């Protein structure tokens, strides 16, 4: 939309150049040739004039306006008029050439009088004047906020760029804003000059219309003004396109949950962690511990913050990232170079992007390029590609991201310094050695350094435990914990009274700090218990007994909290925890979804006719408020309600801390929870229905395609467990989806773009539901979007690996009649570097299995042969053998080879195999 709208700016610039050139041609001062040379020299200049006219008119007609707004229709009309004027002037030039064989011509307009009547010249001048006036008006309409035209595509496009600038925190549009303002001011000056009798602009226009001599100074000023305005329009067009492209690239790196984890981390308590900026005291041996400030100002490599579970590592990292002292010290380190400061918080309980290497690299690269967009063309090879960006979520491979960071390292040698803060290496989902390698890749330049935090695992100790570059958090937070406990307890009126009358309160704080052993989470839980005791008039001695009786380790504490749940709530509590342990890929479960999980009727979501029931905000708020109370009573604070980073009205439910989730996932706890929920409990099925209830009852302006993905995510999980289609649920979801897909809406485009509802079933791997859908609607197989492509490469079209459970879907689609050669799916499967990126033998085996299925169903074997030289020897040998075997087989495959061949598509498949066999025989002849 942005680039299409900006085409009008480029067109306006070219129209302006043509008008200026035309006015200069008609000005009496324009000399054809200043010497007394012969006709050949005169014709040369006339030819140059003709070439300039052709060039200018061509530059106007090559700019495509593909939209149908009123403004663009008017610009098209101007374009047509200019083409007519150019053709008329070219015709006149041809006639002039024939009449310049003898005599001297003083000027072009003098020559023009030999072939045109005076009235024709006057009309031409009037037409150019009208074009000038129309263009002035159009420019004001396009770019001025004061004009009330209902069609402001260009202005809206520029506003979109500014909105994106604000949203992403970049500063890329200031020049565009300045240019727009200057252009509007220049146009207003031109309009004023044309209306002011005696002004240079008016003099030039009047002289041209009357074929009178034009004052050279007036004409020079007129041309300069027009050229300057044309240049500003070109600059506006060019810079806007660059910014739009930069923003598209940044949006492709960004993902929805990029800030979720950081938002959820609590702020550091007042005056805690300040010690990290101070000079550390020497220990008993006279050695000085690591100085974080020294590392910030002059250090390099990786500074490792190590701490046990619950010690406050994430809170410290959030505290450090934007603290003024951190930035002041890093600016000293950067010196005259530009400082770029970026962060990433791993989150094991989050979605795939929040706990993966891809999420780490995309998030950091986004931050680097956001803070210095000027390096985008140098860092990202795809920026120069003519392929437009898609603002989808999965368009970057690890290899491409790694190459970008290698380019970043080259760039930082000269112009900038980078510091990354990476929290929770232990929350990375995958081999810990992989994330260590990623950190070492990122830190491959002396101008890049990293502060990373994790639990004290040996893999991280081996990689990052270096003198002067590591601190053990629990050894340094004793004073912080004492401050926190004192502040929290003294906030209670009764404790302040006890503090004034009983000196043992100091012993209580000391006792609590000793037992905490540096674990802030334990302190938080115990302090909450103490405050509860104060409410019931506990004395200091009572509070001390509480501390003595409470277990010192977190897991035992969690168990104690669960044991305190009333028996009447225990089944509900177990169900709530099991639901919380199965969040969708989009992140934690919304509070309103938990309210639907709490419904007594398990088929609550399927009631009614399946269409949208618009629920009032008051009802949603009431449900949410009730659910808050029920969660607090049943989970004892181990689950908490937190604000969503995307919406203030849709809070989320999540675990108090990762350690709670880890505790509930232990074998013993899972056994206990399963016993308490009873037989037949299926959290994924319940969540599927609850998310569907949310989908049905959303406000009309809150429909989100991600909600549909959440529903189908759970449906796929249940279908994989039961190996049966969820007919009732899937059909109800389809009806609701189609009821809200009004033509022209974002939802309608999102659904249609990926093969309709069936495409979404394929993408989520709903094998049985897809089979039933295609049986009832076989036309879905032959829509514009290939279901095979979606099954192979995902909706993002950029998936780089396959899972074994996806193979049956490919079999189903091919057996049902999908053409393996449609949309170059087969070519992409062979030619993409997908295979080359696979490290595991399992992935290579799946790839070979997919190739065999495609070949069995008529994929082009000749194309496969062309790709064999690019494969590893073992796989190349296998593919040659497989192709030969298939071509030598009889037309009817052996029984049991592919049961899926016994389908209505069998005839088409055998025909393709016969064609392939005949082609080989002809080649052999």
Image (cartoon, rainbow, N blue to C red):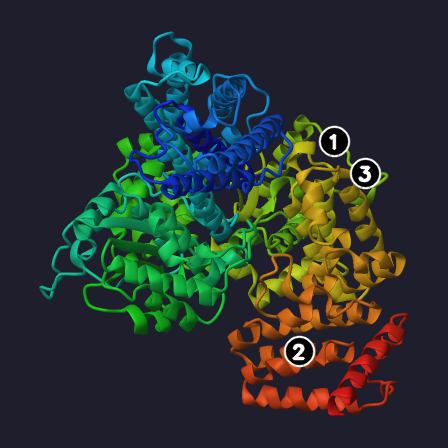
Q: Position of residue 786 (x, y in %)?
A: 73, 61
Q: Is residue 761 above or below residue 6?
A: below
Report the quarter where the C terminus lies. bottom right
Residue at 69% over, 42% down = 747
Q: Position of residue 36 (x, y in %)?
A: 30, 36
Of circles 3 and 2, the one toward us is 2
Q: Spatial distance from mark 1 to mark 3, Cα to Cα?
A: 10 Å
Residue identified by numbered label 1: 614
- Residues at discs 3 and 2 in contact (Cβ within 8 Å): no
Q: Secondary structure at mark 1?
A: loop
Q: Spatial distance from mark 2 to mark 1, Cα to Cα?
A: 53 Å
Q: Residue 611 has which mark?
A: 3
Q: Is residue 657 left or right of residue 566?
A: left
Report the quarter where the N terminus lies. top right
Q: State the residue lying farthest toward the front.
A: 102
Residue 693 sits in which quadrant?
Answer: top right
Residue identified by numbered label 2: 863
- Give the crowd class for mark 3: few <14, some 14-19, many >=20 residues within 10 Å: some
- Give the crowd class for mark 1: few <14, some 14-19, many >=20 residues within 10 Å: few
The front one of 652 and 662 is: 652
Of circles 2 and 1, the one toward us is 2
- Give the crowd class for mark 2: few <14, some 14-19, many >=20 residues within 10 Å: few
Q: Secondary structure at mark 2?
A: helix
Residue at 41% over, 37% down = 234
For marks 3 and 2, the one nearer the N-term is: 3
């Amino acid at each position: 939309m942005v680039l299409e709208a900006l085409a009008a700016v480029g067109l306006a610039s070219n129209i302006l150049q043509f008008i200026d050139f035309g006015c200069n041609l008609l000005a009496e001062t324009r000399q054809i040739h200043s010497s007394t040379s012969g006709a050949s020299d005169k014709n040369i200049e006339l030819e140059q004039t003709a070439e300039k006219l052709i060039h200018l008119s061509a530059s106007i007609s090559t700019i495509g306006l593909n939209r149908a707004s009123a403004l663009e229709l008017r610009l098209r009309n101007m374009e047509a008029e200019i083409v007519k004027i150019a053709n008329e002037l070219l015709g006149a030039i041809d006639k002039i050439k024939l009449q310049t064989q003898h005599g001297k011509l003083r000027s072009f307009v003098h020559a023009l009088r030999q072939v045109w009547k005076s009235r024709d010249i006057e009309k031409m001048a009037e037409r150019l004047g009208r074009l000038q006036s129309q263009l002035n008006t159009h420019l004001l309409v396009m770019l001025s906020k004061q004009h009330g035209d209902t069609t402001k595509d260009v202005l809206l496009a520029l506003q979109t760029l500014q909105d994106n600038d604000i949203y992403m925190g970049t500063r890329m549009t200031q020049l565009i804003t300045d240019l727009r303002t200057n252009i509007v001011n220049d146009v207003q000056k031109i309009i004023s000059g044309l209306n002011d009798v005696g002004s240079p602009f008016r003099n030039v226009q009047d002289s041209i219309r009357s074929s009178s001599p034009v004052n050279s100074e007036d004409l020079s000023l007129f041309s300069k003004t027009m050229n300057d305005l044309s240049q500003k329009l070109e600059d506006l067009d060019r810079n806007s396109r660059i910014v739009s492209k930069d923003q598209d690239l940044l949006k492709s790196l960004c993902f929805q949950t990029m800030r979720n984890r950081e938002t959820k981390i609590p702020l550091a308590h007042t005056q805690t962690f300040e010690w990290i900026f101070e000079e550390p005291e020497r220990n008993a041996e006279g050695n000085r511990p690591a100085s974080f400030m020294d590392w910030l100002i002059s250090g390099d490599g990786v500074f490792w913050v190590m701490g046990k579970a619950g010690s406050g590592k994430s809170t410290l990292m959030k505290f450090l990232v934007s603290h003024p002292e951190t930035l002041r010290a890093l600016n000293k380190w950067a010196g005259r170079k530009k400082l770029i400061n970026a962060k990433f918080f791993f989150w094991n309980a989050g979605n795939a992007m929040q706990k993966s290497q891809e999420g780490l690299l995309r998030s950091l690269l986004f931050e680097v390029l956001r803070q210095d967009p000027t390096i985008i063309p140098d860092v990202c090879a795809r920026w120069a590609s003519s392929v437009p960006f898609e603002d989808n979520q999965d368009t970057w491979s690890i290899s491409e991201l790694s190459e970008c960071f290698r380019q970043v390292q080259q760039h930082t040698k000269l112009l900038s310094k980078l510091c990354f803060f990476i929290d929770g290496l232990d929350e990375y989902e995958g081999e810990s050695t992989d994330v260590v390698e990623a950190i070492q890749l990122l830190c491959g330049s002396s101008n890049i350094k990293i502060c990373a935090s994790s639990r004290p695992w040996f893999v991280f100790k081996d990689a990052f435990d270096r003198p002067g570059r590591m601190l053990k958090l629990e050894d340094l937070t004793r004073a912080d914990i004492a401050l926190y406990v004192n502040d929290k307890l003294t906030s209670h009126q009764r404790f302040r009274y006890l503090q004034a009358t009983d000196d043992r309160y100091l012993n209580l704080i000391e006792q609590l700090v000793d037992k905490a052993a540096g674990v802030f989470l334990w302190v938080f839980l115990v302090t909450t218990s103490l405050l509860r005791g104060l409410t019931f008039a506990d004395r200091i001695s009572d509070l001390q007994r509480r501390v003595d009786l409470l277990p010192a380790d977190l897991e035992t504490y969690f168990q104690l909290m669960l044991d305190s749940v009333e028996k009447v709530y225990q089944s509900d509590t177990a169900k709530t925890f099991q639901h919380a342990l199965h969040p969708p890929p989009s992140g934690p479960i919304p509070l309103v979804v938990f309210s639907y999980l709490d419904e007594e009727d398990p088929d609550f979501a399927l009631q009614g006719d399946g269409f949208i029931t618009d629920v009032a905000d008051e009802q949603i708020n009431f449900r949410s408020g009730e659910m808050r109370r029920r969660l607090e009573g049943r989970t004892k604070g181990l689950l908490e309600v937190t604000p969503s980073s995307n919406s203030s009205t849709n809070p989320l439910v999540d675990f108090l801390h990762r350690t709670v989730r880890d505790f509930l996932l232990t074998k013993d706890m899972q056994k206990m929870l399963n016993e308490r929920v009873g037989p037949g409990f299926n959290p994924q099925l319940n969540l599927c229905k609850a998310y569907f209830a949310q989908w049905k009852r959303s406000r009309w302006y809150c429909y989100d395609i991600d909600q549909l993905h959440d529903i189908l995510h759970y449906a796929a999980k249940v279908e994989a467990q039961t190996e049966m289609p969820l007919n009732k649920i899937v059909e109800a979801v389809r009806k609701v989806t189609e009821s809200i897909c009004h033509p022209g809406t974002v939802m309608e485009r999102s659904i249609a773009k990926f093969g309709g509802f069936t495409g979404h079933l394929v993408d989520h791997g709903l094998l049985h539901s897809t089979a039933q859908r295609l049986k009832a609607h076989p036309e879905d197989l032959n829509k514009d979007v290939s279901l095979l492509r979606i099954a192979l490469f995902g909706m993002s079209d950029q998936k780089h690996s396959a899972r074994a459970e996806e193979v049956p879907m490919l079999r189903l689609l091919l057996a049902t009649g999908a053409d393996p050669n449609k949309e170059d799916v087969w070519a992409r499967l062979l030619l993409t570097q997908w295979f080359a990126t696979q490290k595991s033998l399992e992935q290579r085996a799946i790839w070979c299995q997919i190739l065999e299925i495609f070949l069995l169903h008529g994929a082009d074997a000749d194309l496969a042969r062309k790709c064999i030289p690019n494969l590893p020897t073992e796989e190349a040998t296998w593919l040659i053998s497989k192709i030969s075997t298939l071509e030598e087989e009889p037309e009817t495959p052996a029984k049991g080879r592919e049961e899926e061949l016994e389908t209505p598509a069998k005839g088409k498949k055998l025909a393709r195999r016969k064609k392939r066999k005949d082609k080989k025989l002809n080649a052999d002849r």
